[in-house]
Image (cartoon, rainbow, N blue to C red):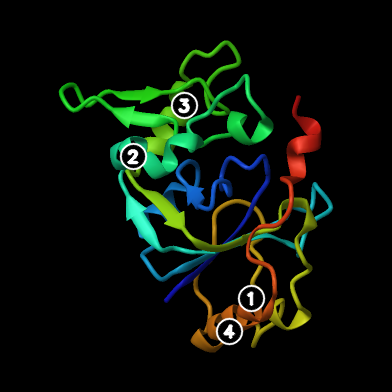
């Protein structure tokens, strides 16, 4: 069991997408999406820019992994296809990619990762689809703007800090630190979707 930790610079409920009883990571973070396996944990922490450094935005245990096409076709995730004329929860859907089985061309829905005029954003397509994996969880807590402060013992656990600074991620933690942190998460009463995304106040 591994624990992946990274900073969420922009929290719109898109990556991760914590709605409709599933927390999904289907865009951004290609290295984590490539490496994480079922049973691993992912924690996203707040940024210093947003005055949320040292606070948790979400934590999820990976319970399922699938390809973009499988995600696209699975009826469980139909509601995660974005509707930009709907509510914010609908507008920030992350089920935005599918691949033509004949040409292998990637298609991107009009979404948070396309251009404002609805045209596909090639840069985002290339970054998101460099790893054809979507991480899925039914065992998660998403706090968004209301996430708790990480206890001090995980900021200096035998010299290891749970929080990543800057881009990328970290996953090299002592086993004791990982199990202790998960035990702490399990001790909390919160489950599932618990708070609105931090950056919704900035979106229309």
Among the two numbered marks 4 and 3 on one chain, the one whose residue lies closer to the N terminus = 3
Mark pair 3, 2: CA separation: 17 Å
**Dot 3 corresponds to which residue?**
123
Among the two numbered marks 3 and 1 on one chain, the one whose residue lies closer to the N terminus = 3
For mark 4, give the secondary structure: helix
| Residue at 40% across, 71% down | 39
| Mark 1 surroundings: few (<14), some (14-19) or many (≥20) residues within 10 A | some
Among the two numbered marks 2 and 4 on one chain, the one whose residue lies closer to the N terminus = 2
Image side of residue 37 versus residue 157, left or right: left
For mark 2, give the secondary structure: helix
Q: What label does residue 177 carry, if any? A: 4
| Mark 4 surroundings: few (<14), some (14-19) or many (≥20) residues within 10 A | some
Image side of residue 13 versus residue 102, left or right: right
| Mark 3 surroundings: few (<14), some (14-19) or many (≥20) residues within 10 A | few
**Dot 2 corresponds to which residue?**
68
Q: Which quadrant does the N terminus fall into?
A: bottom left
**Dot 1 corresponds to which residue?**
185
For mark 1, give the secondary structure: helix
Nearer mark to the viewer, of 2 and 4: 2
Mark pair 4, 1: CA separation: 12 Å
Among the two numbered marks 3 and 2 on one chain, the one whose residue lies closer to the N terminus = 2
| Residue at 48% across, 48% down | 25
Mark pair 3, 1: CA separation: 36 Å
Nearer mark to the viewer, of 3 and 1: 1
Name the quadrant containing residue 59. bottom right
């Amino acid at each position: 069991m591994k624990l992946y930790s990274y900073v969420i610079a922009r929290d719109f409920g898109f990556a991760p997408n914590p709605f409709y009883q599933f927390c999904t990571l289907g865009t951004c973070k290609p290295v984590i999406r490539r490496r994480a396996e079922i049973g691993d944990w992912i924690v996203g922490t707040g940024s210093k820019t947003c005055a949320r450094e040292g606070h948790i935005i979400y934590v999820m245990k990976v319970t399922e992994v699938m390809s973009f096409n499988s995600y696209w076709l699975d009826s469980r995730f139909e509601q995660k296809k974005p509707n930009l004329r709907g509510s914010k929860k609908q507008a920030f859907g992350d089920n935005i990619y599918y691949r033509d089985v004949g040409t292998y061309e990637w298609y991107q829905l009009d979404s948070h990762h396309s251009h404002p005029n609805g045209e596909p954003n090639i840069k985002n397509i290339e970054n998101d689809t460099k790893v054809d994996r979507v991480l899925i969880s039914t065992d998660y807590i998403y706090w968004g703007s209301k996430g708790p402060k990480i206890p001090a013992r995980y900021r200096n656990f035998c010299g290891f800090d749970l929080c990543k600074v800057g881009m990328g991620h970290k996953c090299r933690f002592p086993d004791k630190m990982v199990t202790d942190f998960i035990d702490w998460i399990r001790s909390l009463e919160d489950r599932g979707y618990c708070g609105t995304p931090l950056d919704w106040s900035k979106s229309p």
